Amino acid sequence: MKSKGINYSKMRCPYCGGTVVFRSADGIYKDNSQGVMLYVCSHYPECDTYVRAKKGTRIPVGSMADRKLRCLRKAAHDSFDQLHRSGLMSKQDAYRWLAGVIGAPMSEAHIGYLGEYYCQLIAEESRKLMARLTAGKHEAVE
């Protein structure tokens, strides 16, 4: 996603409407030895909503998410990443597939911007595709 023209200082929490603060992940992450920075809802911890910034920048890696959505995004990424880490697909082919599943251009195919429905869909479809690719690989060997 392009960040050009976005005024991060005017971001609002999509859950409670609170202002968003750019701050260290200290006190949110158990271990912040990497110096991670976050955009955090000003009502944290009552509103447990935040998004990580790309290392060394103020650019968020996705949209603000509560605990449930962060867990769904992690599950989607874990399943999706197996597609290319297994060597059964290239990373580019995996992202092309992802774009097709969510009906978006490749430039917008980022799990960090997806909502609950698409995260669940990606996790499920990734597992199905991985099973088909793995089965096909075993059939080719036999």
Image (cartoon, grey):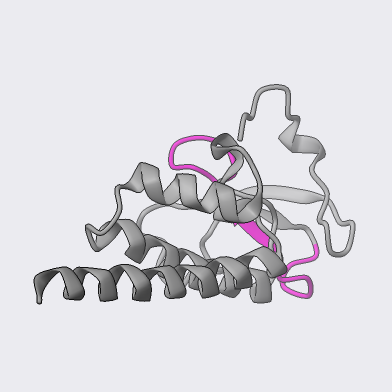
Q: Residue furthest right?
A: 17
Q: Say which of 118 and 113 sits in front.
A: 118
- Relative side of 89 to 126, left or right: left
Quarter-of-image position of residue 109: top right
Instruction: Tell me if residue 32 can be seen.
Output: yes
Residue at the image position 72 percent from the left and 73 percent from the top: 45
- x and y percentages locating residue 125 in the rendered image: 52, 69
Quarter-of-image position of residue 31: bottom left
Q: Tell me which segment is drawn in magenta.
A: 43-60
Quarter-of-image position of residue 47: bottom right
Residue at the image position 43 percent from the left and 42 percent from the top: 55
Taking the magenta stretch, the answer to whether it contains residue 54 is yes
- x and y percentages locating residue 4 in the rendered image: 66, 23
Q: Residue furthest left?
A: 142
Asked if residue 134 is positioned above or below residue 57 in the image, the reply reads below
- x and y percentages locating residue 52 in the rendered image: 55, 52
Taking the magenta stretch, the answer to whether it contains residue 120 is no
- Relative side of 121 to 45, left or right: left
Magenta segment main secondary structure? loop
Q: Residue furthest top?
A: 5
Asked if residue 137 is positioned above or below residue 142 in the image, the reply reads above
- Relative side of 59 to 40, left or right: left
Residue at the image position 45 percent from the left and 74 percent from the top: 128
- x and y percentages locating residue 70 in the rendered image: 60, 68
Q: Say which of 104 and 48 sits in front.
A: 104
